[in-house]
Image (cartoon, rainbow, N blue to C red):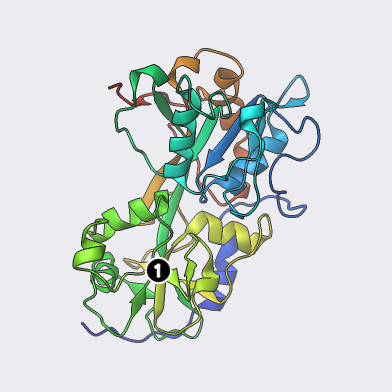
Amino acid sequence: MKFTINKPVAAVVACGLAMISLGAVAGTASADPVGTPTLRALAGVGSDTTYNVMNGLSEVVTIGGVKQIASYDPIPSSSLISPKAAANCQNLTRPNGSTAGRNALIASLTPGNAIENCYDWGRSSSLSLTAVASATGGLTYIPFGVDAFTYAVAKDSAIPRDLSLNDVKSIFQCQVPEYQPYIPQAGSGTRQYWLQQMGLTEATILSTYTCVKDVKNGAIVQEHDGRVLTKSNEIAPFSIANYVAQGAGVQSDLRGIADLGNMDSKSSLNPTTSSTLKRDVYNMIPTTKLTTAPWSTVFVGSGSLVCTNSDTITKYGYGLTANCGSTTNQTPLS
C-alpha cells in the first residue's frame, strides 16, 4: 500500500492545543502523594494513561480539608512504594499499567495474600469485566472521563499526518514494510485497546504480525512517550489527552519529536466529539465498597468528588463523560 506523503503539521498541532480547555496551569503535577497526609485513605495504582490526571485529582479531592486519594506513579520500576503503614505494604514494586493495577487490587482484596489491604482502588484505561474470585467481592469500573487515540510519528516523518483507520490498521498489520510500528509494554490498557482496534491479538503479533514491536534498543516501550519515535519510519499509538496535557505543561513533557496524525480526517486534538477511537477511562474500586465512605464519596455517582472536579479532568486533556460515577460495570464472581 502506498500513501501520499504530507508535510509535517507541528504548527497545526501547537495551535490546536487551545481547542481543549486546559485552565490555568501552575506547573506539572507531582509524583506520588505530596503533603499531608502522605499515607491516605485511598491508595491506588495502575494505568499509565490516567496517572497524571489522578495525581491532579489527588490534590483537590478532600473531605473535611483532608486529601483522600494517593495515586502512585507506574514508573520508575526501580522506585518502590509503601502505600500503607502495615508491614506487608512496605517497599512494593510499582504496578505498571491497567492490568498490573487490576491484579494488585485483586491481590489486596484476597484474604491471606501477601499484599492484603495494601490498595483501595486502581486506575484503568480499559474496561475488563473478566470474572474475579468470589473471595475478593469483585471490582466495579467507574468511568470519569473520555480519552481518544490516534497515531504519532516523528516530526520529520514521511508517514502522512492524515490517514484513515484502515490505513493505520494496514501499517500495524505489517502490510507497509517500510514502516515500523510500536506498541506499549505488556499489561498496558492502551496496548490492549490498540490491538483490538487494529484487529490484532497478543497471539498474532507473535505469530503473524511480527513487525509490531514493544522493545526498542533493549528498552520496553512506555505508552504515551513520544521519545521512542526517533526515526522517520516509526509510528506508535498516543493518547490525545496525554499529548495535550504534556504540551500544556500540566504533566511532564515526553513528546520528544512526536507529532499526532489525524485519523479519518478528524482532528487529533478533540477526544470528545470527533475522534474515531475514543473511550471512557475508569477507576476500579471494590464492589463491596460502593456504599461505604470514602469510596462512595470520592468515586460513586455524578455528585462524587471526582466527577464534580470536572475542571481538573479537562485540564489534563480529557473530555467529560455523561456516565461519570456510574457503577453499572461490575466484574462477575467465579
The N terminus is located in which quarter? bottom left
* Residue 247 image position (x, y, % from top left): 62, 64
The percent coordinates of residue 234 (x first, y second) are: 41, 78
Regarding residue 333, the answer to whether it shows in the image is yes
Q: Nearer the viewer, residue 304 or 230?
A: 230
| Left or right, 33 with reference to 2 | right
Name the residue beneath numbered marker 1: 262
Q: Residue at x 68, y 30 (%)?
A: 61
The residue located at (56%, 27%) in the rendering is: 120
With 235 as the anchor, is 86 left or right in this view?
right
- On screen, residue 55 above or below 203: above
What amino acid type is highlighted by mark number 1? Asn
Residue 273 seen from this side: no
Judge by depth and name the residue closer to the eye, 97 or 61: 97
Left of 201 or right of it: where is 185?
right
Nearer the observer, 58 or 272? 58
- Residue at image position (30%, 33%) is 130
Specify whether 167 is left or right of 137: left
